[in-house]
Image: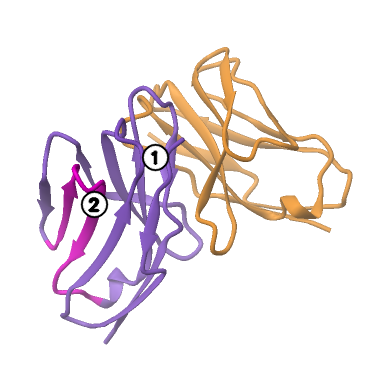
Amino acid sequence: NAGVTQTPKFQVLKTGQSMTLQCAQDMNHEYMSWYRQDPGMGLRLIHYSVGAGITDQGEVPNGYNVSRSTTEDFPLRLLSAAPSQTSVYFCASSYSSDNVLTFGAGSRLTVL
Amino acid sequence: GENVEQHPSTLSVQEGDSAVIKCTYSDSASNYFPWYKQELGKGPQLIIDIRSNVGEKKDQRIAVTLNKTAKHFSLHITETQPEDSAVYFCAASSNTGNQFYFGTGTSLTVIP
């Protein structure tokens, strides 16, 4: 039982490049979400999903895309990276939106 | 939407003393209130949670209290130890809102 697995752990991009942050969970959780963490701003929700085929926007969705084709996977795509997207990204999953949220170890992204 | 405020942003205590972190929320529909501990370079981990039908919950040295009328909840850590040093986040969610709302975090330092 690996929990929530995020890859890569570190990534450096140039402005305008695209990339995908991967997130996989093996707990059969229906609810999955992506957060970004910036100094002094806590955890801000980017996108979330309540089940396969269903996604919705959170507080800071601009510049990011998501899809949920399977229960296990919830990738986050940056279409054209900007320096403002330099951050630490966390994927988290839960059985539901009012249940224990399990976080991955994080992905540190730097956009030059 | 929900607004969660957390205080203080930093807290230093002597080893063995108690630490208290307070959060307020705005949405009366919120019914689940978890607390997370984040150690340096890691993802947040749940340490204790409480639901709106309970006023207090305790787990060894950690306790959480909830005042639904005043819309605030607090984390209490007794007999603090150096390994309690970390960033702590409060959060609020509901089974209808599909989102977790996090406070901005409290950096706790326990001085040996």
Vertical placement of residue A22 versus B8, above or below: above
Please name whichever residue, B17 or A2, is drawn nearer the observer in this view of the structure: B17
Q: Which of the 4 image quarters holds residue B7? A: bottom left
Verify whether residue B80 appears in magenta.
yes
Verify whether residue A105 appears in magenta.
no
Badge 1, how many Cα within 10 Å: few under 14, some, many 20+?
A: many
Circle 1: element type? strand
Identify the colour of chain B in the image.
purple
Badge 2, how many Cα within 10 Å: few under 14, some, many 20+?
A: many
Q: Position of residue A98 (x, y in %)?
A: 32, 30
Vertical placement of residue A81 versus B105, above or below: above
| Lateral position of residue B5 relative to residue B51, left or right | right
Residue type for callout 2: Phe
Q: Position of residue A109 (x, y in %)?
A: 70, 53
Please name whichever residue, B6 or A77, is drawn nearer the observer in this view of the structure: B6
Q: Which of the 4 image quarters holds residue A16? A: top right
Q: Which mark is residue A102?
A: 1
Which residue, given by chain and number where applicable, does mark 2 sit on?
A: B73
| Lateral position of residue A23 relative to residue B17, left or right | right
- Segment tinted magenta in the rendering: B61-81
